[in-house]
Amino acid sequence: MSFQVKSGYIPFTQETVVHFLVQHNFIDPSAPLLVKEIGDGNLNYVFQVQNKATEESWIVKQALPYAKVVGESWPLTLDRSRIESEALKQAHSLVPEFSPIVYLHDSEKAATVMEDLSSHTILRKGLIEGRVYPELAKNVGTYLAHTLFFTSDYGLGSAKKKELAKRFSNPDLCGITESLVFSDPFYNAESNAFTEELRPDVEILWEDQDFLTEVASLKHSFLTKGEALIHGDLHTGSLFVTARSTKVIDPEFAFYGPVGFDIGAFIANLALSILSQEAHRTEEEKDGYLAYLFGVITEVWHVFESTFRSLWDTYLSEDNLYSRSYLDIYLHSIFVDSIGFSGCKIIRRTIGLAHVEEIETITDPVTKLAIERKALHLGKKLILKRKNIDSIEDYIEMIQEVL
Ligand code: ADP
Ligand code: MG
């Protein structure tokens, strides 16, 4: 199968990625180099190129014109590489401490040269190992409030927001989310993947009309609520962490969408981590670690909310109508959306195409099945009851009820 790609596009090899960096004056052709392809994604190459003499290092992320997971059969626009690099630059201009530096984007090669963050660990891996990141919730809450407020009508003004939105029209990647998060898991789609033992539970979901109507309403919000420039895929694999530092990577799904989608993605992935803990911790470790993870969910919401309020007080684009009481209503709607989207994410990671490592790697099938049942039950409850959940503490309680 062939693809419509720009004439200068060729996927890099370890040799040609070096030529590319030499051409752009990042490295001297005679430098002693170590080159590795370190990507674990399905859609892109990620090369790390290190100068062994100076210890300088670069990451080159290149989009592939198809999804690797299904061979070459799923064409995807290379323009997502431009979107990712622009979203990284946008985030860096607002919250430099939480974003990698982008050095260069080459649209013909669909490649971005960025800061090497190898001193960091992917959060999902860290949570599987039972690590504690004391600053994580504060950092993510601050990142969310700043990136979302300052790209919204309230923080940017409506004309500038519309200008910015033009650069982030992302139909291909939004289409993936529309299918994999909001459609396929809710009917007998071919892309779904789950064990036969789970089928009776899945069929109960597929036959529940009230539930499916609520999913439709969340999908509608995803399609139509262009509130802010969202990351679009803020799961724990898109966060790079150390004890103190947090960096958000991989915004190739960025577009103008609902604010609650990023918050929902993050808390859903923490909820899945919580459900998986019985397979990864000893009895003695478990309670302490669960308390930490619950604390992250609670704190991220509180930090997001209080930071958003203070940005609103200081930077609101002038409009008398936007009173404090309107802000209360708006934040409540963000909260309700976040809960609903988190439910969709939990379900899609359980029965949809792509699962999460902390559950997928559980070797005991009985334990794994029990956790997947809990996840389905939790996701459904969150979607159905989201309008009656008043606080993040109630959200925690709902997870505790299924544990
Ligand atoms: P994909 O979109 O294909 O999932 P990611 O951006 O998530 O690609 O990157 C895949 C992997 O490559 C990450 O999990 C991480 O291990 C590595 N990686 C990506 N960006 C960087 C970076 N800036 N520094 C170091 N490693 C990185
Ligand atoms: Mg990605």
Image (cartoon, rainbow, N blue to C red):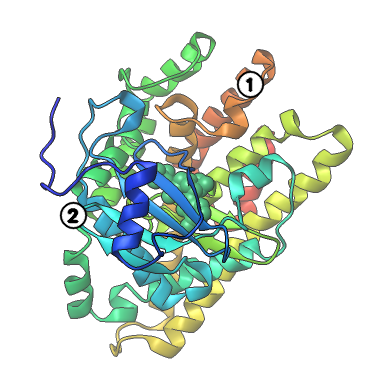
Res 368 → quadrant: top right
Horizontal side of residue 403 vs 17, given as left or right: right
Horizontal side of residue 269 vs 153, given as left or right: right
Res 323 → quadrant: bottom left
Q: Position of residue 180 (x, y in %)?
A: 34, 33
Q: Which of 245 and 227 is in front in this view?
A: 245
Mark 2 CB within 8 Å of ligand 1? no
Q: Where is residue 41 in the image (x, y as percent from the top left)?
A: 43, 39
Q: Is residue 197 above or below residue 159?
A: above
Q: Is residue 76 above or below residue 99?
A: above
Res 175 seen here:
yes
Res 140 → quadrant: bottom right
Amino acid marked by disc 2: Glu
For mark 2, what is the residue?
A: 108
The residue sitting at the top extreme is: 196
Q: Position of residue 76 (x, y in %)?
A: 22, 39
Q: Which of 167 and 11 is in front in this view?
A: 11
Q: Is mark 2 on a helix, strand or loop?
A: loop
Q: Nearer the viewer, residue 124 or 365?
A: 124
For mark 1, what is the residue?
A: 368
Q: What element carries label 1?
A: helix
Q: Where is residue 342 in the image (x, y as percent from the top left)?
A: 48, 45
Amino acid marked by disc 1: Lys
Q: In which quarter of the image is the C terminus?
A: top right
Dot 1 crowding, Cα within 10 Å, few <14, some 14–19, many 20+: some
